Amino acid sequence: MNAKTMGAVLLAAGWLMGCSSTEYSKNPEAHERLHAEAKLDRDAAEKIALARVPGGTVREAELEKEHGRLLWSFDITTSGSDEVTEVEIDAKTGEVVSTKKKKG
């Protein structure tokens, strides 16, 4: 498998697992460390996020470090609206860090 193909495979795997940050898709060990550091898995964090957007559907999810804090970030859409709500959940405590609406 050549390097270009391997990069594409890692990027796709990162996206599927909800961790699409370029830095982590290029470095599988860093990706694994992030998930090991998280106390909440994606499903648990997603339930918390969806509770903030009734009737919403997750369009994108990502595990990332922002300002030294490990966060699950979810982009959530609702039927009949062109807005996207970004909900950030602390991956260690389950605290809702922020909820922001933006145009889709």
Image: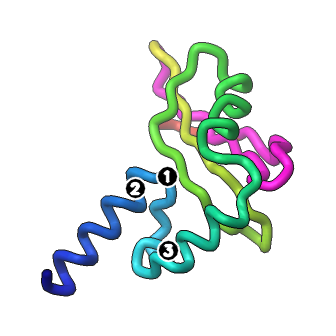
List the single residue furthest toward the bottom.
3
Instruction: For the residues labelled 3 and 1, say whether their Cβ atoms are less than 8 Å apart.
Output: no
Residue for point 61% across, 34% down: 85
Nearest the eye: 54 or 39: 39
Left or right: 4 with respect to 39?
left
Label disc, if present, on residue 73 of the rendered structure: none
Residue for point 40% across, 79% down: 26
Q: Which residues are magenta?
A: 80-99
Nearest the eye: 27 or 66: 27
* Residue designated by label 3: 24
* Residue type of the residue flagged with mark 1: Gly
Q: Position of residue 100 (x, y in %)?
A: 69, 40
At label 3, counting other C-alpha atoms closer than 10 Å, the crowd grade (few under 14, some 14-19, many 20 or more) is: many
How far apart marks 3 and 2 lie (CA) works out to 10 Å
Name the element at disc 2.
helix
Nearest the eye: 55 or 44: 44
Left or right: 59 with respect to 36?
left
Instruction: For the residues labelled 1 and 2, say whether their Cβ atoms are less than 8 Å apart.
Output: yes
* Residue designated by label 1: 18
Q: What's the magenta bit mostly, secondary-structure-wise?
A: strand
Residue for point 36% across, 60% down: 13
Left or right: 34 with respect to 1?
right
18 inside magenta stretch: no
List the single residue furthest toward the front.
36
* Residue designated by label 2: 15
* Residue type of the residue flagged with mark 2: Trp
Q: Position of residue 51 (x, y in %)?
A: 72, 23
Name the element at disc 3.
helix
Q: Look at the picture and state if 52 lies above or below 94.
A: above
